[in-house]
Image (cartoon, grey):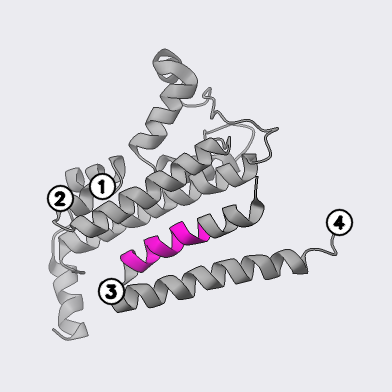
Amino acid sequence: MDHLFLLVWHAFLVAVFFAFLWRSERRDQVLLFLKTFLIMVVGGVLAGWLMYPFP
Amino acid sequence: MTKKTQKKHEESSPPAPLALLGAAWLVPGLGHLILGKRIRAGVFFGVIAAGFLTGILLSGEVGVPSVDNPFSWLSTLACAGNGVLYIIRLIWVNGLGGLLSNLPLGLEGGGDPVAAGFGYGKTFLITAGLMNLLAVLDVSDIARGAKS
């Protein structure tokens, strides 16, 4: 089981959902998708690294 | 329409029909389909079904209420948001007879607590359910004219 893949897959589903829920224009949807997706993936990886020293 | 008049319009508009909201909850995307939002309906169904299936394939457990664990009620509410997918999973795990006879506190949620993907699976199941509940609220807004 690839943890990173699951993180990316989860972020993809959530980002697509909110892009279509909150935006109606195609360009706005793409922008919100990219923003949400990147925040979730990069934020998830960063949070993982920050928790690394903890037992 | 200015914000003020739009707010007045929202306040005076009648609530969305319960049957519409029920349909939107039962089958992800159906509420949007009924309202003529075909693309949004397809995307919502695809995303929510994919999330739910991923959760099941990862051996996640759907939320079922338990007396010992008050938080189980929250995960039940979230997972029940999946509508018919949640009901099918409960029937799959408990059997139809078991489901009816063990309601509400004796149900099994399925999944494998020892599996590596158990926690992730549950996260996917909860996320899918919460997304569908947000989709139901969106259907309500569209039906009331508060959103296009």
Question: Which residue corresponds to mark 3?
Answer: A26
Q: Which residue is mark 2?
A: B34
Q: CA distance from mark 4 to mark 1?
A: 44 Å
Residue type at mark 4 is Pro
**Circles 1 and 2: CB atoms closer than 8 Å:** yes
Q: Chain of mark 3?
A: A
Q: Which residue, given by chain and number where applicable, does mark 1 sit on? A: B24
Above-or-below relation of B34 to B10? above
Query: Which residue corresponds to mark 4?
Result: A55
Alpha-carbon span between mark 4 and mark 3: 45 Å
Question: For mark 4, does the 10 Å Cα neighbourhood hold few (<14), some (14 to 19), or many (20 or more) residues?
Answer: few
Helix, strand or loop for disc 4: loop
Magenta stretch: give its range.
Answer: A10-21
Residue B113 visible to an observer of this rendering: yes
Give the mark, 1 or 2, whose residue is nearer the N terminus. 1
The chain that hosts pointer 2 is: B
Mark 4 / mark 3, whichever is N-terminal: 3
* Quarter of the figure that contains the N terminus of chain B: bottom left
Helix, strand or loop status at disc 1: helix
